[in-house]
Amino acid sequence: MKKTKKMAETVAIKSAQVFPPDTNYYGTLFGGKLMAHIDDVASISATRFARNPTVTASTDSVDFLRPIKVGDTVTLKAMVTHTGRSSMEVFVRVTSENLITGEEEVAALSFLTFVAIDENGRPVEVGNVAPETEEERWLFDTAPARAAYRKTRKDHSKELSSFFKKL
């Protein structure tokens, strides 16, 4: 039987400096580049929790709140916020920091879902995650509503997929 782990035990942090090749015409970080960083750090968090390989089941949301400029440092903090039988919801908070001024801002927020798998690629059970802080409790308590929305969105995607097979 899998045990319960504290959310803090699942934290993964990644930092990178933003260089000109990472940016668009406006000198801000490409959204796709940031999404790759998000998926990477979320995968580390999920795998740290499950202690099994994990795969991305969905990127539930990525909200870009502030532009991340060339020369800034981007820091991503991920943690598992809720679990199902084999799935894990992972929250990622992205901050940008101007290293010269020290100004730091939340630049993006994201929720992803990962599934733990065995050596044959089949889902395996994961344990439970336990919140300790007020922020963690909020993320944990609001997870069922996000899960319900995720299910509705997935059902809609299946419907769309069926429609587009006909075109």
Image (cartoon, helix red, strand yellow):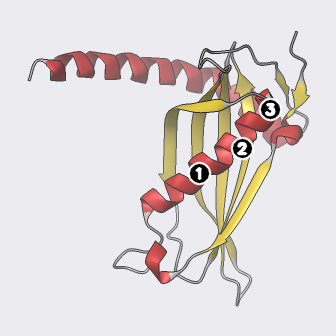
- Tell me what residue is drawn at x 66 percent, y 82 percent: 98
Measured as percent of width and height from the top left, residue 114 is found at 61, 30
Q: How many marks?
A: 3
* Residue for point 51% across, 53% down: 35
Amino acid type of the residue that numbered disc 3 sits on in the rendered structure: Phe
Q: Earlier in the sequence, mark 3 or mark 2?
A: 2
Check disc 2 and report its element: helix, strand or loop.
helix
Q: Give the CA separation, mark 3 to mark 2.
A: 9 Å
| Residue situated furthest left in the rendering | 167
Badge 1 amino acid:
Ile
Task: Please provide percent x and percent y for residue 143.
Answer: 66, 26
Could you tell me residue 97's position as x and y percent?
68, 75
Q: Secondary structure at mark 3?
A: helix
Q: Quadrant of the N terminus?
A: top right
Residue most extreme to the top = 1
- Residue pointed to by mark 3: 49
Lateral position of residue 49 relative to residue 108, left or right: right
Residue at the extreme bottom: 100
Earlier along the polypeptide chain: callout 3 or callout 1? Answer: 1
Left or right of 150: which side holds 96?
right
Q: Is residue 89 visible?
A: yes
Name the residue that disc number 2 marks.
Answer: 44
In the picture, the disc for residue 38 is 1
Name the residue nearer the viewer: 65 or 83: 83
